[in-house]
Amino acid sequence: MAKHKKLEDYREQIEQCVKCGACQAHCPVFGEHKRESIVARGKVALAHALLNDEVKLDERLVEDMSKCLMCASCFDKCPNLVPTDEIVAAARREIADQQGLSTFGKALTTVIKNPRLMNTLAKSGKAFSALLFKKVPEQSGLRLRFPLPFVSRERSIPEIAAKPFRERHPEVIPGEAGKPTVAFFTGCMINYMYPEIGDALLKILKFMGVTVLIPGDQGCCGLPAISAGDSATVEELSKRNLAALTRRTPDVILTACATCNEGIGRHFKHLEGEYAAMAEKVMDMNVFLVRHGLDKLLAELPRKAVFQRVTYHDPCHLRTQGITKEPRALLRALPGVRFVDMEGADRCCGLGGTFSVYHYDTSKLIGARKVPGIEQSGADLVATACPGCMMQLQDTINHAGLKPRVIHLLELIAHDLPA
């Protein structure tokens, strides 16, 4: 397996940054703080200075490098395609190598690389949820937690599933002869917090006649460890997922989480040999469903007399891959949905994984910028295709006192399919 690139490996790309400042208009964090060292060109300049021994890994530099959502919005708009998100990840690995992981980073990576520990914590959390959590509001399906390590007491989070998704289903669900075989990479949030998303996907794939593999030994996609700078954990998880997802020979490895798609897709493409080959099979569920004509099948269903007004939020890890038309095609085809696009649909929600833990106040400010678009859309539901975005958007809606509920696109599709 190829090792992760060092910061030195990015020297050429770092020196391609012409400091034009185009990134300023697209960096959600700079939009809130207006500080040069936070925007992409500022971080690239810091990385360059670090390589040339012009600055040291002091507290201020570590803080500035932590203020990145790794949404790749800057890379998406950069005229020279400088991969700032990868450069920041390499800088964080450099920081972790020299200074060790933060307390939160250690706790996080210890849990995500240990499935038994994760299962135990999830089941314990569920067992004690009545004591630990306070429900707010009733219709949201979310809970406001009492003080727990690392997480703000203001943060709304989903309820923990009574039983993880992967424990509720067999590893092989046969489909029809001649139809594709897909391996479903569930990710942590669908497995432990949003199993209903996985159930919805299974209903849809059954409707399409697809054979589904749900490898029980798959692990976290590794993106939280990449964000924390823990390359050893990333490599351990990559090996585990490669073994789990290639044990059989699926035609496609399907993700229903934009972040997981980034974790086992784009990240694996950076690795050599069998990892890159596996990544070629990774596909977001929106792309798969449209490629196999589900939008056309939905459009042929009888229209319903009662509609739900639905808008859509673009997860950054899909938007920056150009996956924006497919979810809208599916929503427009649904017989029980009246789709309305909202202003700022492509604006980051502010989660950024560990970013929202380290910088929750900034995360909330970024999320609040979604509120006017949601209100003006008049939507009953805000659909998206990333469980992490769902959690952040519902938190934003709760703080703003709005009525819309956040839902995964797959749940809407499954609801409108024939029984």
Image (spheres, helix red, strand yellow):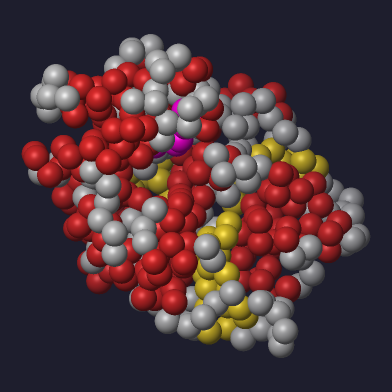
Residue 107 in the image, given as x and y percentages of width and height: 18, 51
**The N terminus: image quadrant:** bottom left
Span colored in magenta:
70-75
In screen coordinates, is 66 left or right of 13?
A: left
What is the residue that sits farthest to the front in this orientation?
12
Residue 118 on the magenta span? no
Percent across and percent down for residue 217 are 36, 76
Q: Which residue is painted at 13% across and 20% down in the image?
A: 55
Query: Is 60 on the left-hand or right-hand side of 314?
Result: left
Q: Is residue 374 visible?
A: yes
- Residue nearest the viewer, comparing 340 with 39: 39
**180 over 1 or under it: above or below:** below
Residue 300: name its quadrant: bottom right
Q: Quadrant of residue 404?
A: top right
Question: Residue 63 at what x, y percent from top left?
Answer: 21, 26
Identify the image quadrant of residue 64: top left
Instruction: Tally the numbered discs.
Output: 0
Q: Is residue 163 visible?
A: no
Q: Is residue 111 left or right of residue 75?
A: left
Using the image as rendered, state which of residue 73 and residue 363 is in the foreground: 73
Q: Is residue 135 above or below residue 185?
A: above
Figure check: 230 above or below 194: above
Choose between 91 and 35: the one closer to the eye: 91
Q: Tell me which residue sits at (79%, 53%) in the image.
A: 334
Q: Residue at x 17, y 25 (%)?
A: 52
Residue at (78% x, 63% y) in the render? 293
Q: Quadrant of the C terminus?
A: bottom right
